[in-house]
Image: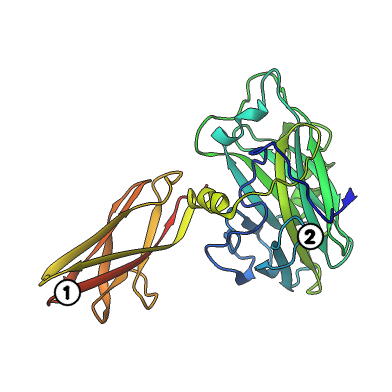
Amino acid sequence: MTKARTNASASPAVGRNMIINGAMNVAQRATSVTGIGGSVILPTCDRWVINPGATAGRATVTQTADGPNGISANCLKIDCTTADASIASGEQFILEHKLEGQNVQRIGKGVAGAKQVTISFYVKANAAFNFALEFFDADNSRNCSKLFATTTDWVRQELTFPADVDDGSSPFDDDNAASVRLFFWLHAGSDFTSGTLQSGSFANNTNANRAAGIDSILSSTDNNFFITGVQMEVGPVATEFEQEDISTTLAKCQRYFQGNGRLIQTGDGVIGYLQASALLPVEMRATPTAVIRDNAGTTGKVSADSTNNIAGTTTGLSTTFVSAGANNVVIGNNVFMSVHFTLDAEL
């Protein structure tokens, strides 16, 4: 454990960080969401999932302008708003990040020559807590977990996970599905804490060993948790956090979610059906799920001329292209149709 650096020197090793949006700079969905804890959700910062289970605790999650100097101006903050001090056996509250199999092939996991992986991040809380970071192999249900501590100051944690050669039969799938799931365990019941932490090596998953020894972020409404500067790289050494241009980070996030799309179509003397289409700024991970809305934010509708709430449908959708249209468009010259949309291809 090291204190947060006041400045980060430039490093020539570009692209070593496998985490997307580790600086918490992109938040296409929202910057603050309340009442988190009832279901899995990507509330604020892109690529960062809150994965709860069976807990009565609730939290507000925000993208917050509070980061360690020289690392990031932003962090993800989890603030407990409803405590759950009586922890049932199956409870959990996890901050999660998923990585595609084709983006983690450099690790060589599960075969001869497999490499160590070091995950570093800057973290603080309202008090001293012990939490756990679990590296979970989703293709083969193998895992390894490491405890880390918080203080009230920004501290950089550097956790090295061993190479997992296994028996040579459990490599990551080379595809666009989730092969690595990083679980920051912040609250858990005995189903996940009653064993011995699986920390020295990878093993076939045993739930009781996944989060043994952790405290609970949901134990009091005084509790909060801050994280930023998350980096995952090959090898046993944590290098300086890789500073990435915001346009590069945004393009990486748009592979999974595009939240600010708008289609505009004009026409003269249009009667009945009008359609608008556009190429996407980046190819998405898979054919996305689309939600369209009008200028007023009403889903399933589009806006035409000055009239809102015209029924709209997604008429064409691929990883590179989106098209939407509406029937019963206003009759007249210079008809104007506006379609707002979000596209979701998350892991």
Few, some or many residues within 10 Å of mark 2 (<14, 14–19, 20+): many
Question: Residue tagged by mark 2?
Answer: 68
Distance from Cα at disc 2 to Cα at disc 1: 52 Å
Which corner quadrant of the image does residue 274 belong to? bottom left
* Foreground residue among 189 and 1: 1
Q: Identity of the amino acid at label 1?
A: Asn
Q: Can residue 188 be seen at all in this image of the molecule?
A: no
Q: Position of residue 178 (x, y in %)?
A: 56, 40
Q: Position of residue 304 (x, y in %)?
A: 24, 75
Q: Residue at x 78, y 54 (%)?
A: 122
Question: Residue tagged by mark 1?
Answer: 334
* Foreground residue among 171 and 330: 330
Is 150 positioned to the left or the right of 267 in the image? right
Q: Position of residue 347 (x, y in %)?
A: 52, 47
Using the image, determine if residue 211 lies above or below residue 51: above
Few, some or many residues within 10 Å of mark 1 (<14, 14–19, 20+): few
